[in-house]
Amino acid sequence: MRLSLAKPDSVRDTFCKARQGLIRMGWKRFLLAGVLVLSVAAPAQAAGRQPDLLSFGAGWQEVLINTPYRNGGDFRLEHRWGVSLLSALSDGFTSTDEWFQLHPYLGVETSTRKQFYGHGGLVLDFLIGRNIVVSPNFAVGYYNQNQGKRLGHPLEFRSTFEAGFRFDNEVRVTAYLSHISTANIGERNPGVEMAGLYLHLPASK
């Protein structure tokens, strides 16, 4: 039996199609909702079931296309609020907290090529049992290429698939695969993929 691996182009196309689908659903509404809930996240902390997380990430960019003059180390720092936005907005959603939560987050990302990406977005936390977490997340932010890859526009969208282990003390270790691109709002849309690991440390009880 042969094991066939997905080609890099097909993986990239999947990321792009998923992002474009979210945009057709209304990115403006999606982001506006995120901004509004960020404003209530702090006072609503008691409604959440998880602590805030301070997240450190490290990995490699251009993992699907080996271009030595563009690849490099990928470094991330994020703050993820522990409040579950669904239950904070309505008590009717508190029953979902045990297996699904929606969290706002803010972050910065840089690289060995001095790129900068300041962004904010939402994390979809799927809790499988006590210890397994699957946390796809979506963000929008400002990108400065510096010595890195030219992505075609200062406004860039990032989609990430993330999964890993949650320890009993709320520390998490997860792996991530991300794609950043303009979602075709600029003249160019080459995109870039990154893969690596996160260490999430609880910042509040």
Image (cartoon, grey):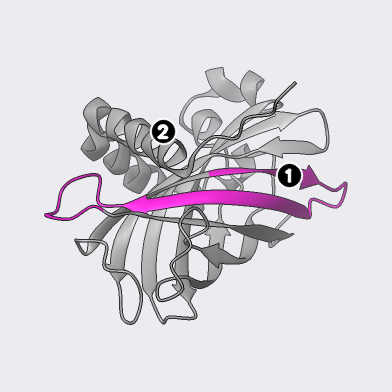
The answer to which of 81 and 119 lies nearer the viewer is 119
Give x and y (percent) for residue 85. Answer: 50, 36
Whether residue 21 sits left or right of residue 63 in the image: it is left
**Which part of the image, by quadrant, shows the N terminus?**
top right
- Identify the residue under disc 2: 14
Residue 164, labelled with which disc? Answer: 1
* Numbered circles on residues, count: 2
Q: CA distance from mark 1 to mark 2?
A: 22 Å
The structure residue drawn at horizontal position 46% and vertical position 38%, both measured from the top left corner, is 11
Location of residue 111 in the rendering, given as x and y in whole percent from the top left corner: 48, 75
What amino acid type is highlighted by mark number 2? Thr
- Few, some or many residues within 10 Å of mark 1 (<14, 14–19, 20+): some
Q: Residue at x 47, y 44 (%)?
A: 8
- Residue 40 on image: x %, y %: 43, 47
Magenta-drawn segment: 161-189
Q: Residues within 10 Å of mark 2 (few under 14, many from 20)?
A: few
Horizontal side, residue 101 vs residue 7: left or right: right
Which amino acid is tagged 1?
A: Gly
Quick one: which residue is furthest to the front in this view?
A: 1
Q: Looking at this view, is 28 or 44 the one in front?
A: 28
Q: On screen, 43 above or below 29?
A: below
